[in-house]
Image: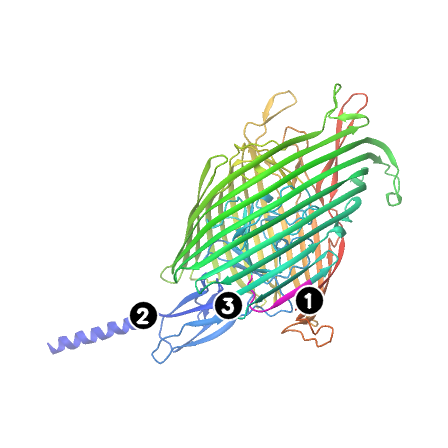
Amino acid sequence: MIKLKTLLTVVIFCLSAIVCLAQSYVIKGIVLDSSNQPLDVVNVIRAGNGKGVITNSKGEFEINIENKKRSVELIFSLLGFQTQNLVVKANKNGVFPLVKVTLAESSTLIKQVKVVSDKGFTSTKIVKINGLDLSPISVGGVETIIKTFPGVVSNNEMSSQYSVRGGNFDENLVYINGVEVYKPFLIKSGQQEGLSAVNPDLVGNVKFSAGGFNSNYGDKLSSVLDIQYRRPTQFEASAKASLLGGSFHFGGVSKDKKLSVMSGARYKTNSFFLGTLQTEGEYTPSFFDFQLFSNYKLSQKTEVSVLANVALNRYNFIPKNRETTFGSLANIQTLRIYYEGREVDKFNTSQVSVNVNNKLSDKVFSKTSVSGYISNEKETYDILGQYWLQDLDNDSNLTGGADGKLNIGVGSYLDHARNYLDTKVLAVSNKGIVDFDDLELTWKVGCDIQDFDFSTNEWKMLDSAGYSVPYSNNSIEFEFFKKNNKHITNYIYSGNLNGQYIWRQLGGSSFSLDAGVRFNYSNINNEFFLSPRARLVFKPVSDQYLSFNLSVGSYNQPVFFKEMVDEFGQFHNDVLSQKSWHFVLGNTFEFKWWGRPFKFDTEVYYKYMYDLNPYKMKNVQIVYAANNSATGYAYGADVKLNGEFVEGVESWVSISVLRTKEDIDGDFYLNKNDEKTDIGYYPRPTDRLFNFSLFFQDYLPVFPSWKVNLTAFFGTGMPQQMPFSDNPNNFFRIPDYKRIDIGFSKVFKKEGLIKNDSRILKPFKGFWVGLEVFNLLDTKNTISHMWVKSVNGSTGEQGQYAVPNYLTGRVINVKISAEF
C-alpha cells in the first residue's frame, strides 16, 4: 500500500511538472501613436525566436510565452514608424504587467507620406496614409496621392477625379468623418472643377479601398475613400501661398480639453495652367472654400462633433482663338478657330453634419448623425467659333510657319447653354458597435432624402461651307439639342449588419473573418436590394510577415440624379441601380531590403456587372443612356512595392493591368449587306490596359534640409468611340498618357529638427520654400477630340476629322509654407 501511494505521488508530481512546462503565459498590451491613437497591424515579435502577433484595431495584443521567464524582450515594428525594443519583466508574483508602448513616426525633416496596409484583422483591405506632404500637386490633395495607387486611373491633371478597376468617376465613395460628401454635377471639364472636398491641412488619416470593401461602407460600385480630420492637442496654425493660390488653417483646444476646433480656408486659381492650353483667351477662375471641424465633450460618455464646409466656385472664360497642329509626318493638318462670346459658370456648395457619439458601456457604442448638403449650380455660355481646317505643305518649314495647301473644311458653329441645378440632400442615421473582444458587431440604419430641381436648355448649330450639319435639303437642323425642366425627390433607406471575428489555431496561425449584409431601398423606382459581403484573411505562423486574403461581395449603386437623365435631357424614373459582384484574391509580404522595411502587395480580381447604365465620357462629364440595358465585366491584377528606397522616407511604385468590357442587350449594326449584326462585347470608356505610377521622396544626405518629391504616370490610351456611329466597336484609342511632376523644397526651420534663431523666422515653428515643375517634359497629352465636320458642296456628303484636345503644358510654381 505504501509503495502504491508513493508511486501515485510520483506520477502526479510528474504530470504536474509536464503541465507546468507546457503552460503558456501571456503578455498583454496596447500600442499607440504619438497622438495617443491606437495603432493596428503593428508587428509584436519575441526577440530571439522570431515568433509574434499583430495588434488589432484597438492597438491591443496578446503574445504567448511557452516557458515561464522573468523577463522577455519584445520588438515592435510598423512601416512608417520607428522600431522599438522593450524588455518586459514579471513582478515578484511572476505576473507580467500590462504593456503600453508609444511608437514615434520615422524622424524626417518635414512630413512624409507613409502608407500602411491594413492586412484584414480590422475591417477590410484598406490602405492607410499617414503624415501627408502633398507636394507637388496641381489640383486636389489627397486624391493626388490616391492616383498613384494600383488600380486607380486618371488621365486629367486638371481634375481630382479618378476611376478604379474599370469603374467611372461616379462609382467612388468619399467620406469625411463618416459623412458622405458630394461634388457638383454639371461640371464638364477639369477647367471648371474647383477645390477638392478634402482639405489636406486638416487631414488626420486616410483609408482607401479599391474594391471588396465590407458592408459598413455604402452603396457604390468601385472604391471607398475614408477621410478622418484630426483633433488638435494644442494650438497650431499654418499658411501657404503660391502662384496657384493659398491656404490657411488653425486649430486649438480649450484649457479643460472639452472643446477642440480645426478650421481651414483655401483659395485656388488655375490661370497659369489654363494659359498653357490650346485655346487662348481670358481665363478668370476663382475657387474658395472654408471648412470647420469641432468637437465638444458633454460628459465622459457623450461627445458632439460638427463638420461644416462652404465652397464658392466661379469659372469665367472669354475665348479668343485656337490653333492645333496634328496628324502624321506624311499628313500634317492644322485647325484654326476664332471665337466670339463667353462662358460664365457658378458652382456653390455647402454641407453641415452633426454627430452625437455615446459610450453606453465599455463595450457598447452608438453614433447618431444628421447631415445636410445644398448646392446651387449654373452653367451658361454662348460661344461662336469660325474654323478653318487645312492640310499643310510638307515641304514648308513648320517652325517658321506653314502655309495651308488645301482647305479641308471651312465653317462655323454656335454653342448655347442655360443649365441650372439646385440640389438638397438630408441624411439621418444611427450606428452601433458592440465589442465582444475577438468579435465586433456593427450595425447602421439611415435615410437619405434627395431633392433636385433641374433645368436645361442646350443646343449646338454647325454650319460647314454654307451647309447646316446635319445636312438637309428642306430645313435647318441642330447638330445637338436638349431641353427639359424637372423636379425630382427620392427617399433612400439603407442599413447594414457587419461582424468581424478573429481566431487562432494551435501553433499560432491567425484567421480573421469579416462578414456582413447591407440593404437599400429607393422609393423613386421601388427597388430593394440585399448585398452580402465577406472577407477571409489567413496569416500563417511560419511567416509572420506574410498574409493572404479573399474577398467576395455583392454591390449596387442606387440611382442618383445623373443616372436618370439621358443625353437629350429627358428624365427616366424607371432606371434601376447598377450592380456587380466582386471577387478579390491577394497577399501581402513584408521584408527587409538594404536593412530597411519594404512591403509587396498583389491582388487579382474579377468583377461581374449587370443592370449597367451605358454612358459616354466627354472630358470629365459622364452622360448616361438612362437605362439598364448592359452587362459587363472587369478583370485584372494590381501590384505595389513600397518602402524606404531612401532611408527614413517612403516611396512606392504601382503597376496595374486591366480589361473591362460591356454588352448592350439587343444592340446591332448594319453591315455592308444591310444585315443586322450583333455587336457583342466592346471596351468600356475606362478600359486602360496598362497603368504605371511612381511616387518617390528623397533628400540630400549632406544637406537633409533639401528635399525632392516626384510623381510619374504612364497609361495606355483609353478607347474613344467614333461619334454618330451605331457600332461601339468603331472606336480608337487616344494616345498614351505620360506625365512627370517634380517638386523641390528647402526647410529653413522645423521645430524639433532644424533650429533657426533669426529675427525673421523667430515667430514660426516651421518655414520652408518650394519650387514645383508640373509636366516636366512638357508632354502633349490628349484628353478628348473635337470632331470637325465638313460638307461637300456638290454631293452633300459629310466628312469628319478628329482634332485632339490637349491638356496642360509645363508650368512652374513657387510655394511658401509656414507653421505657427
Magenta residues: mostly which secondary structure? loop
Q: Quadrant of residue 563?
A: top right
The reply to whether residue 285 is in sight is yes
Furthest residue toward top? 474
Q: What separation in Å lies between label 2 and label 3 (alpha carbons)?
A: 37 Å
User: Mark 3 or mark 1, which is nearer the start of the sequence?
Assistant: 3
Which sits in the foreground, 786 or 600? 786
What residue type is disc 2 on? Ala
Say which element carries label 2: helix
Pointer 3 residue: 36
Pointer 2 residue: 22
Q: Residues within 10 Å of mark 3 (few under 14, many from 20)?
A: few
Pointer 1 residue: 818
Q: Position of residue 443 (x, y in %)?
A: 42, 51
Q: What separation in Å lies between label 2 and label 1 (alpha carbons)?
A: 59 Å
Taking the spot 48% from the left edge, 71% from the top edge, the residue there is 101
Q: Which residues are magenta?
A: 230-239
Residue 237, magenta (yes or no): yes
Furthest residue toward left? 1
Say which element carries label 3: loop
